[in-house]
Image (cartoon, grey):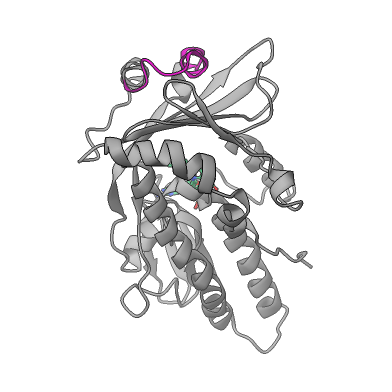
Amino acid sequence: MAIKTEDGRELRSFKFKEEDESQEVRAVERGILLETLASQLPPDAIRFSSKLAKIDKSESGETLLELTDGTQLYAKIVIGCDGIRSPIATWMGFSEPRYVGHCAFRGLAFYPDGQPFEPKVNYIYGRGVRAGYVPVSATKVYWFVCFNSSTPGPKITDPSVLKKQTGELVKNWPQELLNIIDVTPDDTIIRTPLVDRWLWPTISPSASTGRVVLVGDAWHPMTPNLGQGACCALEDAVVLARKLASAIKSEPTSVEDALKSYETERWPRIFPLTIRANLVGSLLQLDNPLVCSVRNNVVIPKVVRLGPILEHTNFECEPLS
Ligand SMILES: Cc1cc2nc3c(=O)[nH]c(=O)nc-3n(C[C@H](O)[C@H](O)[C@H](O)COP(=O)(O)OP(=O)(O)OC[C@H]3O[C@@H](n4cnc5c(N)ncnc54)[C@H](O)[C@@H]3O)c2cc1C
């Protein structure tokens, strides 16, 4: 991992293995992850592009799911993994996630003849703006630019506008970053207002009601400053699968109890991470020149150690039976 300033000066570089033998970083393209997981299931197990319009309790005690094409499904168990604007979370009484004051542009640069970068994560810190890039495959490089904005701003879908706005934020930054943005296909660039939701005990609704349960961003949207949102969604899935499997194998626990037990196990992990990610983001987005100078000349080169920073990524995932 390398950290530079906006004028290209290297502040620090770390090797994950030197800090902690168990650590490595893997950048995974979402489509590939989805295909890999889906390929482990029977061919008809997943029905894609099924947009939920409405959810309700049915008279039979099952949950009624109505799709936008009018299809009605009666479900014994519903796992709501429908992201930050989850209609299932809304139905369960969760509030809208809260905007945290910064947005991110993201894209996937494409190099048809092979990308030229070393397998490392690169960060560039400016004042109130920061960027990063990391190779994800032999031909693709993921990048982001995060910036302060008092409001989430209008939804912009025109890719040429998105690319132009990104370029303006980092216009005198290292050429390497500008080239990466330049070779990014328009249809991979998006702008996302960053949000989170703090799950205060006793105040927030429960992660499950009856046989309906939330996982991932639908339950605990967090800002991406620790790179843990998708990781936590995967951890949720592992824990939930284990709890459900033992309930369904007719151990004394009911499905409803299994869902409550999943929440009890996951909350102590995701609540502190949500808060920590928020605080880290607020610190990294500071634009005060004095604070940024101390960060660049003292904190990053002399104080920061990778081991403690990455401790939160350790999650013991026992094999699923
Ligand atoms: C800028 C940025 C950088 C990030 N970087 C990282 C990182 O480095 N590491 C990391 O671990 N995480 C990162 N994250 C977080 C990560 O993207 C999310 O935490 C993760 O995608 C959550 O997965 P999910 O499956 O819960 O939700 P999502 O990925 O949002 O998936 C929700 C799914 O539900 C579907 N859906 C929505 N509404 C409906 C409906 N009505 N009916 C049916 N389906 C519906 C959507 O189409 C989508 O397929 C980052 C996020 C951002 C914004």
Magenta includes 244?
A: no
Closer to us: 176 or 306: 306
Residue 91 is left or right of residue 118, and the answer is: left
Q: Residue furthest bottom?
A: 252
The segment highlighted magenta reads 169-185
Q: Quadrant of the C terminus?
A: bottom right
Magenta includes 170?
A: yes
Q: Is residue 16 above or below residue 203?
A: above
Which residue lies at the image location 41% right of the left edge and 51% below the top edge? 280
Tag count in the figure? 0
Residue 242: percent from the left, percent from the top?
A: 68, 70
Which residue lies at the image location 47% right of the left edge and 12% below the top edge? 182
Q: Residue furthest top?
A: 113
Q: Is residue 213 above or below residue 187?
A: below
Residue 21 is left or right of residue 261, and the answer is: right
Asked whether residue 146 appears in the rendered view, the answer is no
Closer to us: 215 or 123: 123
Among the 4 quarters of the image, the one containing residue 279: bottom left
Asked whether residue 91 appears in the rendered view, the answer is yes
Residue 281: percent from the left, percent from the top?
A: 38, 47
Residue 42 is left or right of residue 231, and the answer is: right
Residue 171: percent from the left, percent from the top?
A: 36, 16
Residue 9: percent from the left, percent from the top?
A: 49, 24
Closer to us: 307 or 190: 307
Q: Quadrant of the N terminus?
A: top right
